[in-house]
Amino acid sequence: WTDFFTQQLRWSRGTYETIIGQFWKGFGTMPPGKLFNYTMMIIFYPMSAMNWILAALSCALFLGMGASGVQIDPTIWMMLYGNASALQIGLYIWNRRHNVSPHEPEGSGGLAGMVMSALSAPIYARSLMDAVLRRKSSFVVTPKGDSSSPDTLFGTFRIHLFFIVVFGASMISSFFLGHSHPAMVTWATLALLITAAPIIGWRYTIRAEKKKRRSGGGSHRNGEPAPEPRPLPGAPGNDQTMQIVRIALGGRKK
């Protein structure tokens, strides 16, 4: 997870720097069609980051402080939201016909990639804030093999923990301050689960590996020593980044 998040942080920051420093040059050098296609590609990271930041901000304002927006009839809201969702899903399915990624099997729906992008949304948000505040960043090659970085709760997932505190504190305070609303609590709960999912998956993997090591100890029936157990996630020798990316892209280990 550490190397994967570092990679996503670097890629998103590079996109932000491209938008800030180079994107405007394309208006005079690229045809309208190519410019539109290029724009649609590079706005993925900033749109994901803005969605996540606004989600956290809206939860804090509504659930924590009691602020509310425009009052809309629930039926009209559901109609508009349903139409927008159906259009988005339909457009995605239609555009998947043109997918030419060599990393995905033919006919893949791209669901795994979308899940990994959602889990990385807090990273995109942090990267956007760094770009806006003009904090310095350095190029770091993604470690592989024996040089892979270990995963730690307060090192690897510190950004996720921050958003867990934001969503969790907003929900808890809403019940004490009388600002709770079923719809907002539901959205905050979903955001909280998405934020905590990498941590839960990381802990589950560690426990599974420890259990496998304990059950695989000792010797074989023929007296030969048991094979060396696989290293824990994040330990030296475990290329966890490539495993995560391979799963996200829908590929299979060869």
Image: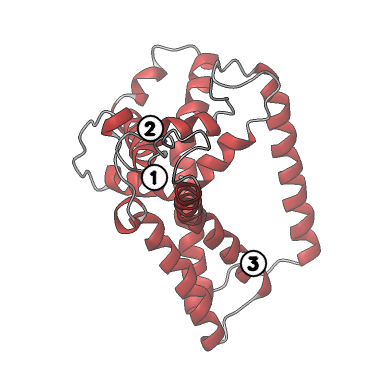
CB contact under 8 Å: marks 2 and 1: no
Q: Quick one: SS at disc 3?
A: helix
Picture coordinates of residue 161, whole percent (x, y): 39, 61
Picture coordinates of residue 26, whole percent (x, y): 39, 18
Picture coordinates of residue 225, whole percent (x, y): 41, 36
Picture coordinates of residue 144, whole percent (x, y): 32, 28
Q: Residue at x 67, y 24 (%)?
A: 96
Any part of residue 189 in sight: yes
- Whether residue 96 sits left or right of residue 252 in the image: it is right
Q: Residue flagged by tag 1: what amino acid is it?
A: Leu
Q: Earlier in the sequence, mark 3 or mark 2?
A: 3
Q: Residue at x 60, y 36 (%)?
A: 112
Q: Is residue 130 above or below residue 67?
A: above
Q: Residue flagged by tag 3: what amino acid is it?
A: Thr
Q: Which mark is residue 42?
A: none
Q: Residue flagged by tag 2: what amino acid is it?
A: Asp
Where does label 3 land, which residue? 186
In the rendered picture of this protein, how many numbered marks are placed on residues? 3
Where does label 2 land, which residue? 239
Q: Residue at x 32, y 31 (%)?
A: 14
Where does label 1 land, which residue? 232
